[in-house]
Amino acid sequence: MAILVTGGAGFIGSHTCIELLNEGYEIIVVDNFSNSKPESLNRVCEITGKYIMIYHLDLLDSESLEKVFLVNQIEAVIHFAGLKAVGESIKDSLKYYKNNITTTIIICELMQKYNVKKLVFSSSATVYGLPDTVPITEGSPVQAINPYGRTKLMIEEILQDLYISDNEWSITILRYFNPIGAHESGLIGEDPSGIPNNLMPYITKVAVGQLKELQIFGKSYSTVDGTGVRDYIHVVDLAIGHVFALDKTLKTSGVKIYNLGTGKGYSVLEVVSAFEAATGVKIPFKITQPRTGDAAICYANTSKAEKELNWIAKKSIQDMCEDSWRWQSHNPNGYTKNEELENPRLIRSEVFLMPKN
């Protein structure tokens, strides 16, 4: 029996694949590589010394996805795949609604058809919108303020309705805060296209000389230094959280929601300072206008995950900075731009074609 990982070549997905393999799980990855690289999975195999079955397909292609269920014994699904840029979601909202929601419905329909009713869903703290109070608990008001966040919130509601209609399902919804860092090997990390949307890859691109300076959006918030405060969590801690969530999902039924963060907030300037201290690299920056919709302070209450999953984030902000820099300095251009797999002996990238009736 295998765990199907959608979007497994992405930043969080690839790190989770490592932790799943290290725990002895057999995994199957489905990815269309629209915002990820096949090379990340090649390196997952290099790190773990284990084999991954990979299917290069789009989740909107329900016919091809069904073949994955037909030819494999799947025990559960971890669903990472989805478009994730807030700015792009505002400019092209229909693209986000069609992709993120429709693909999830397709996956759930196939899971139901093949009696695979164990699901871990990759949600986001963006469902909380502009929080009224911090730290944010799972019971805090949900009020997504952009199309990306609304797709996550709508999917959460769809999954809860799914359980109401069929209580054999076991669904765990994980609301991430701000993942940064990279695997300690320096072999895999975050590889955004163009100018990064997130803070840490922006910092590392400046550090490696690809960008002139960091733009900091506003310095007039009611925070320790006027810059926005966020809950930054090491991607490896986050990946381990998925393994703990999967273990609980396999053993229970119902719908469970957990925040995954550190429970501590750092300002933008505190992160910059921590990066400079950890690496010795100076980061030039410029203060620009605040972005509409940015909260001043956003960090998690993680006590529910600690109690029910027995999980807690362990890595420090220094670890996050050191590992991010190790990845970027060893891979200044990210993963190879060649979409072909560099070592096809380790992994497979094909869809089995099943005969049609």
Image (cartoon, rainbow, N blue to C red):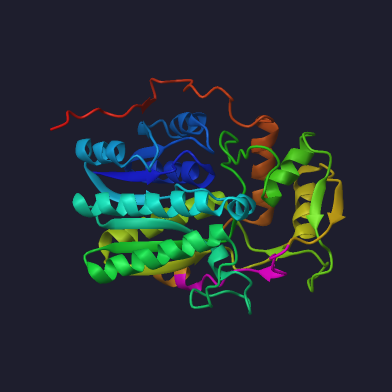
- Residue toward you, 266 or 287: 287
Span highlighted in magenta in the image: 292-304
Quarter of the picture containing the N terminus is: top left
Q: Please tell me whether residue 82 is drawn above or below residue 124 in the rendered image.
A: above
Can I make out residue 321 in this image?
A: no
Say above or below: 141 vs 274.
Answer: below
Q: Using the rendered image of the protein, determine whether residue 69 is visible from the camera's viewpoint.
A: yes
Residue 294 part of the magenta segment = yes
Magenta stretch: helix, strand or loop mostly: loop
Q: Percent position (x, y) of residue 110? A: 25, 49
Left or right of residue 338, residue 343 in this image = left
Percent across and percent down for residue 73 are: 21, 42
What residue appears at the point 51 percent right and 33 percent down from the top-left corner?
Answer: 40
Which is more toward the observer, 217 or 238? 217
- In the image shown, does 94 or 146 lie closer to the viewer? 94
Q: Quadrant of residue 52?
A: top left
Queried whether the magenta region covers residue 295, the answer comes back as yes
Position of 89 relative to 38 (above/below): below
Residue 338 in percent (x, y) is at 55, 22
Q: Is residue 143 toward the left or the right of residue 289 in the image?
A: left
Q: Residue at the left extreme?
A: 357
x%, y% of residue 271? 74, 55
Q: Quadrant of the C terminus?
A: top left
Residue in the picture at 27% in, 71% down: 164
Which residue is drawn at the image coordinates 42% and 55% (left, top)?
Answer: 101
- Which residue is painted at 60% across and 41% down in the image? 190
